[in-house]
Image (spheres, helix red, strand yellow):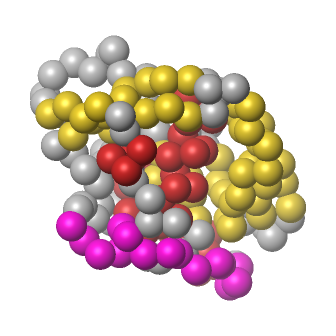
């Protein structure tokens, strides 16, 4: 595994519509491993491939319950609404208040190219929505109703989605 460099605004790759993954096997497995390592190294709870400069529809998430790999994910059900403060590894200087669905169901392929459905509530649902937004070039600052300066050295226990 190798840690990759996290792309930050104004890197244009963060604003592109990412392409579906069509190639499976060793290349994809290596890429997902690198994404996971990069996410853990930067204390993130989620990472989308565009954040390491690869404009493909790939997401890794770990909200403390083990890694989830999503290839070509889409939200097929969403319910309720929840407000929380979000941050993003690609926009380290800002955090913001964002409304998301409280519960979502995501359909995706796993790395073995099998169709899966994953349900998430609360923080996990938020991570799904934040990361899938990245695949469409959408960032939390586009959705935030209030933005604040972030001070990365300070305790962020009050944020529900640290960095993603
Ligand atoms: Zn993000």
For this view, does 76 lie left or right of residue 10? right
Quick check: can you spot residue 86? Answer: no
Q: Position of residue 86 (x, y in %)?
A: 38, 34
Judged by its main secondary structure, the magenta piece is loop
For this view, does 93 lie left or right of residue 75? left
110 shown above or below 46 = below
Q: Position of residue 151 (x, y in %)?
A: 13, 30
Give the residue furthest to the bottom: 23
Please tell me in which quadrant of the rendered image residue 84 appears. Answer: top left
Say which quadrant the N terminus sits in: bottom left
156 shown above or below 99 = above
For this view, does 60 lie left or right of residue 42? right
Q: Which residues are magenta?
A: 10-24
23 shown above or below 2 = below
Looking at the image, which residue is at 50% across and 75% down?
A: 17
Please tell me in which quadrant of the rendered image residue 100 appears. Answer: top right
70 shown above or below 25 = above
Question: Any magenta on residue 157?
Answer: no
């Amino acid at each position: 595994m190798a840690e990759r460099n996290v792309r930050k605004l104004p890197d244009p790759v963060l604003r592109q519509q990412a392409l579906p993954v069509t190639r499976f096997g060793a290349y994809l497995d290596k890429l997902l491993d690198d994404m996971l390592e990069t996410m853990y190294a930067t204390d993130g709870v989620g990472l989308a491939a565009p954040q390491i400069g690869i404009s493909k529809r790939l997401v890794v998430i770990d909200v403390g319950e083990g890694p989830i790999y999503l290839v070509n994910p889409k939200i097929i059900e969403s319910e309720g609404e929840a407000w929380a403060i979000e941050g993003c590894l690609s926009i380290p200087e800002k955090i913001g208040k964002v409304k998301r669905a409280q519960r979502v169901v995501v359909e995706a392929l796993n790395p073995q190219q099998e169709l899966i459905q994953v349900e998430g509530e609360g923080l996990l649902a938020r991570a799904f929505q934040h990361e899938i937004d990245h695949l469409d070039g959408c960032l939390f600052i586009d959705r935030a109703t209030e933005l604040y300066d972030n001070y990365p050295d300070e305790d962020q226990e009050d944020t529900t989605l640290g960095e993603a």
